[in-house]
Image (spheres, grey):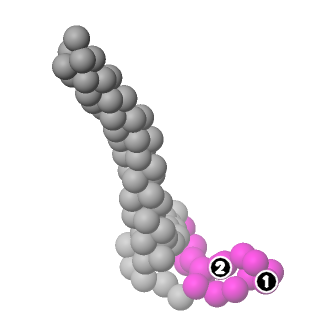
């Protein structure tokens, strides 16, 4: 965009991009926002939430399982006495 108006983007020196700008003070804005980037960001965030959730949940389940086994052993020992 040149001064808020769409402009044609041309290839310059193979890797670069160029826009024809008239003389004078102008504002040139290049934006790059592909849909694939947004999808990748969302999938990465969901994966991070999943990993953090499992990292918290699994140790808690092991702790609960261990405490229930101890209480079962105490009940068994109380019955034997």
Q: Which residue is mark 2?
A: 18
The local crowd at label 2, few if under 14, some if 14 to 19, many if 20 or more residues have their Cα within 10 Å, is few
Of residues 74 and 54, which is closer to you in this image? Answer: 74
Residue appearing at x 21%, y 15% in the figure = 78
Q: Which residues are magenta?
A: 9-24
Tag nearer the camera, 1 or 2: 1
11 magenta-colored:
yes
Quarter holding residue 23: bottom right
In the rendered image, the residue lying farthest to the top is 81
Q: Secondary structure at mark 2?
A: strand
Query: Viewer-proximal residue, 48 or 53?
Result: 53
Drawn side of residue 32 relative to residue 79, left or right: right
Vertical comparison of 7 with 29: above or below: below
In three-dimensional space, the C-alpha distance between marks 1 and 2, rounded to whole angstroms, equals 11 Å
In the image, 76 versus 23, the foreground residue is 76
Per the image, the residue denoted by label 1 is 14
Q: Are marks 1 and 2 in contact (CB under 8 Å)?
A: no
Q: Any magenta on residue 21? A: yes
Q: Is residue 3 visible?
A: no
Quarter in which the C terminus is drawn: top left
Q: Residue at x 32, y 29 (%)?
A: 69
Please give left or right for residue 78 compared with residue 40 in the image: left
The answer to whether residue 9 is above or below residue 4 is: below
State whether residue 29 appears in this view.
yes
Work out whether 45 lies above or below 4: above
Give the overall secondary structure of the magenta segment: loop
């Amino acid at each position: 965009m040149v001064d808020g108006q769409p402009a044609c983007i041309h290839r310059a020196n193979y890797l670069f991009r160029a826009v024809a700008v008239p003389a004078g003070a102008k504002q040139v804005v290049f934006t790059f926002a592909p849909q694939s980037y947004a999808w990748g960001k969302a999938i990465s965030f969901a994966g991070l939430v999943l990993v953090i959730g499992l990292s918290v949940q699994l140790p808690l389940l092991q702790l609960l399982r261990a405490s229930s086994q101890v209480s079962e052993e105490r009940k068994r020992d109380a019955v034997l006495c």
